[in-house]
Amino acid sequence: MKVLLTHGYFLEEDPKEKEIMKPYPPLGILYISSYLNENEVENEVFDSTFSTKESLFKHIRSYNPDVIALYTNLMTKLNILDIIKEVKMLKSDCKIVLGGPDVTYNTKNYLDNGADFIVIGEGEVTMLELAQALSNGSSVDDVDGIAYLSSSGDEVKTKPRTKLRDINELPVPNRAAIPIEKYLKAWKDHHGKSALNVSTQRGCPYTCKWCSTAVYGQSYRRRSPKEVVKELMDIKENYNPDSIWFVDDVFTVSHKWLFEMADEMEKQDLYIPFECITRAERMNDEVIAALKRMGCFRVWIGAESGSQKIIDAMDRRVSVDKVREMIVKTRESGIEAGTFIMVGYPGETDEDIKETLHHLKISNPDFYTITVAYPIKGTDLYNEIEKEITQKPEWNLSTDRDIDFKRTYPKSFYKHAIRFISAEMEFYRYKLDRRLYGPKSFKLLGKIVFSRIFMWFYKKSILQNN
């Protein structure tokens, strides 16, 4: 039994990501590769990030796998569907297995489009048992956590997979299976320092309505500080990156774990600069001090909106004042603060957007990202707006990002709102730096004015239609 693991993301096809150029290794399939190795199942990883589809298909022909397992998310969905078609022509007897966040609530669609099996939830144990069942010809019905089509074309789902209780039992990702040096070089060439990613936890105990928990569920499971530090020391010895990105949803969710982690790093004389994501209510002076002691140079503190009304609608369970306070305190400590902003959430008005701008000016984070809200299937947000969907292209030609729903104003309004907020913030920072006059400032003023004009136009069109 030969298993080929890949993920269908090709950096060369993504102009925006090529400009940003912050690629990270695919930890999910590297965990599965390690687990298969530990259980003596032959496997290879084809890391598509710096490659091409042509190279992938060439590798499939030469490696001749019995099973191809593909990690699937919103970004890679359309590529995955193309790869399935090509593989069916190249090697019709090869079984195609899909896993990842996009498959859980789209099992039938993926099966109808050529996938043989869907792994629902965590992949390590399920992938092992499925590979063993296919190898020895036993019934796949005994494998928990999969979906497939019966001989009559009906969808079959086996018993849900029980989540791993102790994730310390998992081997570390098989980073040796991919060309890590390409990631390090990409970062070094474009940002002056290299970076790699590490996972310390699985699941998120919070209930934000727009967020998908399709793989790890609404849970909290953490590797011990000793195991994490051991992995970090191994990474430092073998790859010596300049920084680490902890991919965990809420890095400081457990203060007990965090303080033990800080102590363990100090005990092992380990220092690696890192950045992470957390929530404002899981931050305080002690937490900020611990992060600084550990080497944290940047914390991303979720906000999503500066309007308490919208934050409550999202079920974020945090006050906007707390978010502002923690962004300011983080920056005052010498750690950079980043935040995330979302516009176009159901019920959001122009006043809410002005509150978001006010929030950004008060907290003045070092970095922020802005997106227009979109509903991911399986989330509470999707369930709430499903009856108000106004645009839903054919499933196999689109992703959830293309779904639109009835909002306070048209989607175009929020796209101009992003331009407005971005220009206003840049101009605000110009004023703080006392660079009020000059071509750049006048250009920004023009963007602000034109964005507001377009926003007014779309607001007026709604009022006229009503």
Image (cartoon, grey):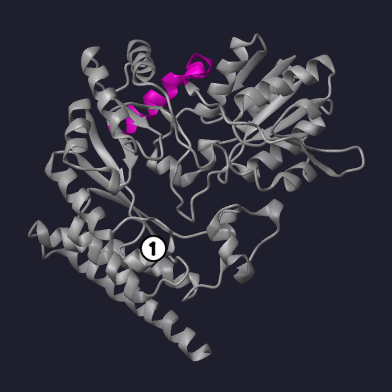
The quadrant in which residue 99 appears is top right
From the image, give the main secondary structure of the stretch colored magenta. Answer: helix
Whether residue 270 sits left or right of residue 385 in the image: it is: left
Query: Judging from the image, what secondary structure is the residue with disc 1 in?
Result: helix
Residue range in magenta is 168-191
Of all residues, the one furthest to the right in this rendering is 152
Q: Quadrant of the N terminus?
A: top right
Whether residue 101 sits left or right of residue 16 in the image: it is: right
Percent coordinates x, y for residue 306 in the rendering: 30, 63
Specify whether residue 273 is in view: no
Residue tagged 1:
312
Q: Residue at x 34, y 40 (%)?
A: 277
372 or 187: nearer the eye? 372
The amino acid type, in three-letter code, at marker 1 is: Asp
Residue 174 in magenta?
A: yes
Residue 1 in magenta?
A: no
The quadrant in which residue 115 appears is top right
304 or 21: nearer the eye? 304
Other residues around mark 1 within 10 Å, as few (<14) / some (14–19) / many (≥20)? some
The quadrant in which residue 68 appears is top right
